[in-house]
Image: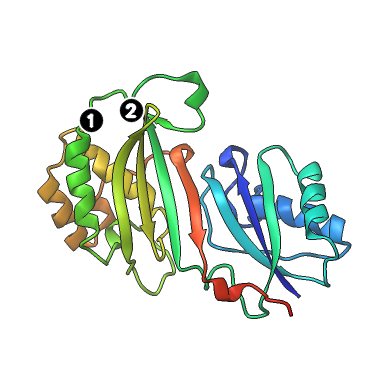
Amino acid sequence: MRYFIQFSYFGKHYHGWQNQPNAISVQEVLEDVMSKLLGNAVSLTGAGRTDAGVHAKQMFAHFDTEKIADLTDLTYRLNAFLPDDISVQKIFEVTDEAHARFDATERTYEYWITQVKNPFLNEAAYFVKQPLDFTKMNVAAQLLLQHHDFECFSKSNTDVKTYRCELKKAVWEEKDGLWIFTVSADRFLRNMVRAMVGTLLEVGQGKLEVVDVKTILKSKDRAQAGPSVPAKGLYLTQVNYPESIRKTHG
């Protein structure tokens, strides 16, 4: 039977979601605990990959196993054995064809910036002491919504077949003393959000003009865009799926 697992993690101590040959990953830790509790090897397929140090408030993966008698009890036991920086919210049965990566219709990320030195945000947000013009940064962010090819923000030498992404939201908002960039799309390229934010920060600092963002987008050249901001400020916050993937009984 196929199940989806919804979970979250604070990424500081992990080399991203996906298994790595010589580094600890969230996938490795979760698979190990699940395999022990279920009594058979569990292989997880995630909704996507997050890079080293990136966090996830909402992440999904699917796995196949024999019928689980009590999903609530399994969730409780998983949380008892998992480290404090990984938490499972729920497990639910899905159709046999449901796929955590390919069936996702929309993903949302947030990037957190603080302009005030705050010891409680050292590992959770990026401290930028220079003054930033967020009005200009929002004007530049709106240009992203008019574009579809984001090769200029993609990590070099990636094996993707297309750089096309359909952005649905890109906005800076102030919340509780933080400046948060929220971006939603059907898919994202590797390093895309961190490169976007780095470019928008250069607009906010006056190193780039809003019109320069158009030029960067058309160039398809990663070297033209701004530097990637640190991973610690990036959060995967939501992954959407069609209701049709859920298994209905009766």
Q: Is residue 95 above or below residue 28?
A: below
Which residue type does callout 1 highlight? Leu
Which type of secondary structure does the marked residue at label 2 adopt? Answer: loop
Q: What is the quadrant of the N terminus in the image?
A: bottom right
Report the disc number at residue 128.
Answer: 2
Q: CA distance from mark 1 to mark 2?
A: 9 Å
Please identify the quarter of the rendering in which residue 63 is found. bottom right
Dot 2: few (<14), some (14–19), or many (≥20) neighbours within 10 Å? few
Q: Is residue 95 above or below residue 217?
A: below
In this rendering, position of residue 29 left or right of residue 221: right
In this rendering, position of residue 110 left or right of residue 82: left
Q: Residue at point 56% right, 51% down? A: 58
In the image, 128 versus 107, the foreground residue is 107
Which residue occupies the extreme right position in the image? 39
In the image, 148 versus 13, the foreground residue is 148
Labels 1 & 2 near each other (Cβ < 8 A): yes
Q: What is the quadrant of the C terminus in the image?
A: bottom right
In this rendering, position of residue 192 left or right of residue 52: left
Q: Residue at point 51% right, 30% down? A: 123
